[in-house]
Image: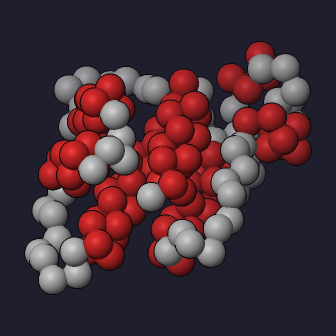
C-alpha cells in the first residue's frame, strides 16, 4: 500500500513533512504513574490516530470519538475507585453528571462534552470536525489525566 499524505496539511505551516506534522500537530500526552494502564494505552492509540491523520484526515474525527470513549472509561474507573461497592454508572451521561456533582468538570464542560460527543457518535448528516478536533482532544486528554 502506497500512502500519500493528505494535501490539506500542505496549507498548515510546518506540516509539509510527516516529521514537521508530528512536531507541530501531534500533542504530547504526559505519562503519569497515577493514570491507569488501560487509559495510558488508549491515549497512545489516540496519539497514533492523530499521527495517521497526516495520511487520512478523517482519522482526527476517529481519534476524537475514541477520546470520548476513553473519557467515559476514565470517569467510570475513577467512580469505581471511590465507590468500589457501588454498581458502575451505565454510560457517559451519568458519568458526566457524577463528575459535575463532584466538581471534576464545570457546567460548561459538561454541556460541551455532551453536545459534541453526541454530534459525533450519532451523526444526522455527514460532517467533519477535522483540525478543530485536535484542540478538543488535547483538552479532553488533560481532563482525563487529572482524574
Q: Nearer the viewer, residue 40 or 6?
A: 40
Q: Tell me which residue sits at (84%, 20%) in the image.
A: 13
Q: Position of residue 70 (x, y in %)?
A: 41, 58
Q: Quadrant location of residue 19?
A: top right
Percent of width and height locating residue 59? 54, 43
Q: Can residue 58 be seen by looking at this rendering? A: no
Where residue 24 sits, quadrant-wise, is top right
| Residue at far front of view | 102
Q: How many marks?
A: 0
Q: Quadrant of residue 76?
A: bottom left
As drawn, 12 above or below 38: above
In the displayed structure, would residue 50 be above or below residue 38?
above
Residue depicted at x 87% and y 27%: 14
Query: Which color mode does the image show?
Result: secondary structure
Q: Quadrant of the N terminus?
A: bottom right
Image position, residue 128 (x, y; %): 44, 26
Nearest the viewer among 145 and 20 is 145
Q: Residue furthest top?
A: 11
In the image, taking residue 93 as reference, residue 4 lies left or right, namely right
Q: Which quadrant is home to the C terminus?
A: bottom left
Task: Determine the residue positioned at 49% across, 68% down.
Answer: 39
Instruction: List x then y, in percent, for residue 85.
Output: 15, 83
Left or right? Give the position of 9 relative to 129: right
Picture residue at 39% right of the left edge, 62% below the top: 74
Q: Is 103 on the left or on the right of 132, as rendered?
A: left
Comparing 7 with 145, the one in front is 145
Whether residue 93 is visible: yes
Amino acid at each position: 500500500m502506497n500512502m500519500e499524505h493528505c494535501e490539506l496539511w500542505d496549507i498548515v505551516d510546518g506540516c509539509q513533512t510527516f516529521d514537521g506534522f508530528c512536531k507541530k500537530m501531534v500533542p504530547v500526552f504526559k505519562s503519569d504513574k497515577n493514570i491507569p494502564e488501560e487509559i495510558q494505552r488508549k491515549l497512545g492509540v489516540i496519539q497514533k490516530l492523530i499521527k495517521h491523520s497526516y495520511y487520512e484526515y478523517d482519522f482526527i474525527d476517529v481519534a476524537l470519538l475514541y477520546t470520548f470513549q476513553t473519557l467515559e472509561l476514565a470517569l467510570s474507573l475513577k467512580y469505581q475507585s471511590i465507590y468500589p461497592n457501588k454498581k458502575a454508572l451505565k454510560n457517559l451521561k451519568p458519568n458526566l453528571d457524577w463528575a459535575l456533582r463532584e466538581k471534576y468538570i464545570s457546567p460548561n464542560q459538561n454541556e460541551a462534552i455532551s453536545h459534541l460527543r453526541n454530534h459525533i457518535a450519532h451523526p444526522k448528516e455527514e460532517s467533519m470536525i477535522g483540525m478543530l478536533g485536535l484542540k478538543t482532544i488535547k483538552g479532553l486528554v488533560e481532563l482525563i489525566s487529572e482524574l
